[in-house]
Image: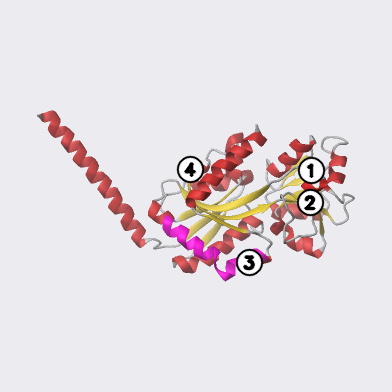
Amino acid sequence: MKQKVDTMNKRLKSLLFSAGILVSATSVAADYPSKNIRLVVPFGAGGGTDAVGRTLANSAKDILGQNIAVMNRTGGAGAVGMSFGAQQRPDGYTLTVVTREIASLPQMGLMQHDAKDFKLIRLVNLDPAVVLVHKDSPYNTINDLIAEAKKGDGIVKFASTAAPNFYLMALEKDQKIKLNAIPYNGASEAIPSVLGKHTDVTMVTPGEAISQLRSGQLKALGVMSEERISYIPDVPTLKEQGVDVVTGTWRGIGAPKNTPDEIIEILGKAFDEAMASTEFKQFMEKGAMTIHNMNAEEFTKFVEQDTKALSTLIN
């Protein structure tokens, strides 16, 4: 008899505990957000990831009724900032811009946290990479660059926006070449390196270098996409030039994994509205960046698939 009573008490406590959690989560969601939100950007100010994060935050703040303060926490090719974001309180008040590095760095042992440490809220942006050199560079096509690189390992100096750089890894693996990769903290540092002729080439998304491309300071050898892109229609793809490399990056928003689903839903709807706003669409178009919205479920599956795809490149 005593055993039955104990069992019933345990079940009752369990039910009450579960009910308490449900009420607590519902109560939190009803009041959310009641204070300012912090958005961690894992790359430096001035780069594409920072620009997307700041503009999205600005578009979403009025929708949520609270300011969204951007915090740049850089280092480790994005690992420092994303790991920091994953470890914050799961209350919806610290969000993180998650980038493709979260699908690659953990597989290389270069990041302690991975996508499973986040609840992914929305994919925001998806763009190919473009190969860039100084306007006075002797390289006019991707094959000019490859031919030079094949003369010896490290002859061509590459300004890497992150270390490791999977744009470079894809090209090196496909062409069996080895460039001298010099690490920089994002495109905002890598592009000036090429402009100053400290390095020979870099690979970034079109939006990160669109002003230098339009002004003629940089020359594009090719875009790493299946087809030419509207922002730089005169630039051929690498595939057109006989180099079968297609790669790029993506950016989205995540929250610590134990964040209540009700809060994730509130944030998701707010970011949907922000991405549909005239302000955000005009910014992205002017900056030569593509809006690519995926909901939480779609985004999670997308990252799982990309992680598997990158494993073939890494391993």
Identify residue type, mark 4.
Asp
User: Residue drawn 66% across and 65% down?
Assistant: 285
Residue 92 in sight: no
Q: Are marks 2 and 4 in contact (CB under 8 Å)?
A: no
Q: Residue furthest left?
A: 1
In the rendered structure, which disc, 1 or 4, sits on the residue that comes first in sequence?
A: 4
Q: Is residue 188 left or right of residue 12?
A: right
In the rendered structure, which disc, 2 or 1, sits on the residue that comes first in sequence?
A: 2
In the rendered structure, which disc, 1 or 3, sits on the residue that comes first in sequence?
A: 1
Residue linked to disc 1: 243
Q: Nearer the viewer, mark 3 or mark 2?
A: 2
Please tell me whether residue 271 belongs to the stretch shown in magenta: yes
The dot on residue 283 is 3
Q: Nearer the viewer, mark 2 or mark 1?
A: 1
Residue 123 in sight: yes
Mark 4 burial class by Cα count in 10 Å: few <14, some 14-19, many 20+ = some
The dot on residue 117 is 4
Residue linked to disc 2: 222
Mark 3 and mark 2: span between their CA atoms?
24 Å
Q: Is residue 281 above or below residue 224?
A: below
Query: Which of the image's four quarters has the N terminus?
Result: top left
Identify residue type, mark 1.
Val
User: Residue drawn 78% across and 52% down?
Assistant: 193
**Image location (x, y in percent) of residue 44:** 64, 54
In the rendered structure, which disc, 2 or 4, sits on the residue that comes first in sequence?
A: 4
Mark 3 burial class by Cα count in 10 Å: few <14, some 14-19, many 20+ = some
Identify residue type, mark 3.
Phe
